[in-house]
Amino acid sequence: MSYVAKDYTHLLGMEGFSDTLLKNHFTLYQGYVANTNKLMETMGAMLQEGKQAAPEFAELKRRFGWEFNGMRLHELYFENLGGDGDPSKAPMLALKVMQQFGSVEACVADFTATATMRGIGWVVCYLDPDSGLLLNTWINEHDVGHPAGLTPLLVLDVFEHAFMIDYGLKRADYLASFMKNLKWEAVAARL
């Protein structure tokens, strides 16, 4: 079995995101899908050949987390775009957010503050299924720093490739466009 890159071209023409930026971002995502498949194939062949004790196998296993999470995080990111930024379209999520943060605006302010920290990576609003808490979390790399057992709800790419073509160093402007195009109902469906 192999993964197939999903088609996100319906996002082209989205306000605040140039087609050039989106097409470049789609190409990067497709590379993660291809590399995930290649790693799975190579590791499978090494297993069949009895080479699982080789240092090369170990390094491929380590690399797999980077490629797979790069693929999956981009899918979650693209899938929570293409909306109109209206949180009322996700009433159950809005209620949960209000219970914890006091308002949707307070949660968005916390998420945005996390997203404007210096550095590159991801910002993810996770649901902790054990406590029911929502946690806005910074992730430096695809393959490290993800809190175990949490469900990603809202995913934002803050690597430069996600905004530099359109916004340069103005990350706050990128975040404003992201929130304006957020598809809250897709985020709520992940609850």
Image: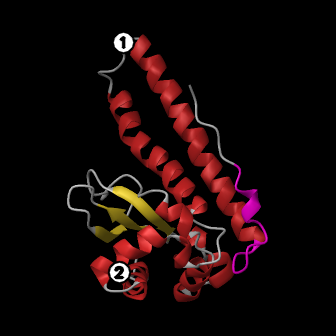
| 113 sits to left or right of 76 | left
Residue 26, quarter of the rendered image: bottom right
Q: Specify which label sits upstream in the sequence, 1 or 2.
A: 1
Image depth: mark 1 or mark 2 in front: 2
Comparing 66 with 149, the one in front is 149
Quadrant assignment, res 94: bottom left
Residue at 65% in and 44% down: 5
Q: Residue 14 appears at what percent x and percent y?
A: 73, 73
Q: Secondary structure at mark 1?
A: loop
Q: Quadrant of the C terminus?
A: bottom left
Magenta span:
7-18
- Where residue 98 is drawn, which disc sits there? 2
Is residue 9 highlighted in magenta?
A: yes
Regarding mark 2 in the picture, which secondary structure is present there?
Answer: helix
Up-down relation of residue 171 to residue 36 (above or below): below
**Which residue is at the front of the view, 186 or 42?**
186
Asked whether residue 34 appears in the rendered view, the answer is: yes
Residue assigned mark 1: 50
Residue in the image at 63% along x and 84% along y: 167
Q: Residue furthest left?
A: 131
> Taking 9 as reference, is 44 above or below it?
above
Instruction: Report x, y in % for residue 149.
Output: 27, 50
Residue 186, numbered label: none
In the rendered image, the quadrant that contains the N terminus is: top right
Q: Amino acid at mark 1?
A: Gly
Residue at mark 1 to residue at mark 2: CA–CA distance: 54 Å
